[in-house]
Structure formats: C-alpha cells, structure tokens
C-alpha cells in the first residue's frame, strides 16, 4: 500500500512539474521576494500595504509582452523576470496572498496563480485562460478572491461590447493554429457583453482619489473597438497623492507615475475610466 502511495505521489509531482513553465531564476526571485517581505511584514500591516511593498519591489523590471503565449497545450507560465501589465498585477496579487496566508511554498504559489488566471481556477485549454480583463474581474469576484468597490465609490453602469479576439484570430497564435477555439471565445465575449459593470469616468477620478486605498487594483477602461480594459495596475500613495504603479509598454519597465492617477488618465486619450477592486 505504501509503495502504491509513493508511486502516486511521484506521478502527481511529475505532472505538476510538467504543467508549469518557469526558470530557476524565476524560482530564486520568488524565494527572495517571499523572504524579504516576510521579514519586513509588520503585524499591523494591511493587505493593501503589503501589495504596495511587493509591487514596488518590481520597479524597473522589464516590460515584455506575450510571455504567456507559448507553444503546445495551455499550461501555467511563471515569469517574475519580465512582465506585462496583467502578469505584473497577477504576480503581485499572488505573492501577497502567499505572504498574507503564510503559505510560502513555490508549489502553493503556482496553485494560487492558476486559480487566479484561469476560469474557475482550472486549466482546460487556451480558452480557459481569462483573456478579457472584465471577465477576469467577474470570475475572480465569483471565486471570492476580490471585491469590486467601483459602484460604492460612485461608479456608473457600463456595458462592454467586446469581440476583438474572435474578430481578429490572426492576431493570436493559438487561435490561428486552433480555429475551433474561436467559437468558444465568441461565446465568452457574448457572456461579457450581457453583463453590467460599473466604472468611474476619468473626468470624475480626481473627486474620489482620496478614497482609493494603497494597494487597490485599477483596471482602466478603453475606447478601442472590441476591447474592454486597456491597461491595469496598482494604486499607491506617495507624497499625499494617489499614483499608479504599473508596467507600461511605452517606457518598457515597471514604474510609478510622476503625476497623480487622475492626471495620468487625462493624458491618454484611449483611457476612459477605471474599475477599482481589492483583494479579499
């Protein structure tokens, strides 16, 4: 019986290792971040403050797009060395959860990242990844991982009209090589378009900026056709201002805006408003 159990454990361990993709440097970075933040974590620190500390630890990390678009079957990609705006947010969220829960094994981190990144926390092919960020918010709210506080901060109703992925499969390697996925993606888009969300128009953000907390997550709505969210990041407080910690494509590294969140939004024409959510 013991030998059967050991064989089962070995098979499961091998399956876990082959189900994820990361480098030794990624694992070393994970262990370094965990070690540093457990040592510095104050008993009275809020989750938002932990998010801010961990997020700042990635300042100057290079921006690299499409790190999740790998060959073969869909699997978990762990990359702490190069980030886009979404993987930056997911990395900080999951590291904070590890520190907060005091469950800091790399294996648990991977399980938590899978739960966050995939529909209902399960990897089941390319369409199971939460590609549209409004869908990410909806699904992770349903899982109880986040709380969308936009409406209570004065948000107004918004209905998205997404469809970019199914209309432009040539822009996605996996849709090009697996055209059968397009129908499933289109069904997901229709579900998103049937929901009501709330957002704060960018012209109104300055009025509620003081009510945004350190470590709040920010999803920026866009006027780009067929899309919902154009950019994401984290609110941080500096010198009495609410600023934006993010991984922008323009300057190619994780950074904090010099001006306030509201001023940043006003400078970018494609940004239309924000959705604000918090880790539960």
Image (cartoon, grey):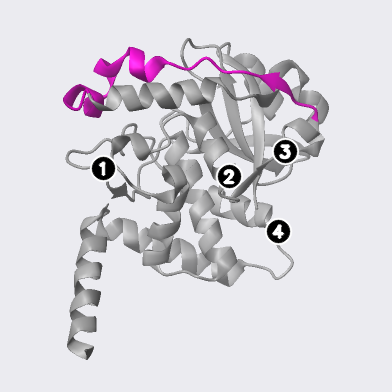
Q: In the rendering, which numbered label is found on residue 142?
A: 2
- Residue beneath disc 1: 74
Badge 1 or badge 2: first in the primary sequence: 1
**Quick one: 2 or 267, which is closer to the camera?**
2
In the picture, residue 20 is in which quadrant?
bottom left
Mark 3: secondary structure: loop
Percent from the top left, x then y, of residue 193? 53, 20
Residue span colored magenta: 154-179
Badge 1 or badge 4: first in the primary sequence: 4
Mark 1: secondary structure: loop
On whether residue 158 falls in the magenta region, the answer is yes
Q: Is residue 193 visible from the viewing direction of this image?
A: yes
Badge 3 or badge 2: first in the primary sequence: 2
**Residue in the picture at 74% in, 67% down:** 44
- Residue beneath disc 4: 46
Mark 2: secondary structure: helix
In the picture, residue 126 is in which quadrant?
top left
Percent from the top left, x then y, of residue 12? 24, 68
Percent from the top left, x then y, of residue 97? 55, 59
Badge 4 or badge 2: first in the primary sequence: 4
Mark 4: secondary structure: loop
**Quick one: 138 or 41, which is closer to the camera?**
138
Rounded to the nearest angstrom, the CA distance separating label 1 from label 4 is 35 Å
In the picture, residue 222 is in which quadrant?
top right
Rounded to the nearest angstrom, the CA distance separating label 1 from label 3 is 32 Å
Q: In the rendering, which numbered label is found on residue 149?
A: 3
**Residue in the picture at 34% in, 34% down:** 127
């Amino acid at each position: 019986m013991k030998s059967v159990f050991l064989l089962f454990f070995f098979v499961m361990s091998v399956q876990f290792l082959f189900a994820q993709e990361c480098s030794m440097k990624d694992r070393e970075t994970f262990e370094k971040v965990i070690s540093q933040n457990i040592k510095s974590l104050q008993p009275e620190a809020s989750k938002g403050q932990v998010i801010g500390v961990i997020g700042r630890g990635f300042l100057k990390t290079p921006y690299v797009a499409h790190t999740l678009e790998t060959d073969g079957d869909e699997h978990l990609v762990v990359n702490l060395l190069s980030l886009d705006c979404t993987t930056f947010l997911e990395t900080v969220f999951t590291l904070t959860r590890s520190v907060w829960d005091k469950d800091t094994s790399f294996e648990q981190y991977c399980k938590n990242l899978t739960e966050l990144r995939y529909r209902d926390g399960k990897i089941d092919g390319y369409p199971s990844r939460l590609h549209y960020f409004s869908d990410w918010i909806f699904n992770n709210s349903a899982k109880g991982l986040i709380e969308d506080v936009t409406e209570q901060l004065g948000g107004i109703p918004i209905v998205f009209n997404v469809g970019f992925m199914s209309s432009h499969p040539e822009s996605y390697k996996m849709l090009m090589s697996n055209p059968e996925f397009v129908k499933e993606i289109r069904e997901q888009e229709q579900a998103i378009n049937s929901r009501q969300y709330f957002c704060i128009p960018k012209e109104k953000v300055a009025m509620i900026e003081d009510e945004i907390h350190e470590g709040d997550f920010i999803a920026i709505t866009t006027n780009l056709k067929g899309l919902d969210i154009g950019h994401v990041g984290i609110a941080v407080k500096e010198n009495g201002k609410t600023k934006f910690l993010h991984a922008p494509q323009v300057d190619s590294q994780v950074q904090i805006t010099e001006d306030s969140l509201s001023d940043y939004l006003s400078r970018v024409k494609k940004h239309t408003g924000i959705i604000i959510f918090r880790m539960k």
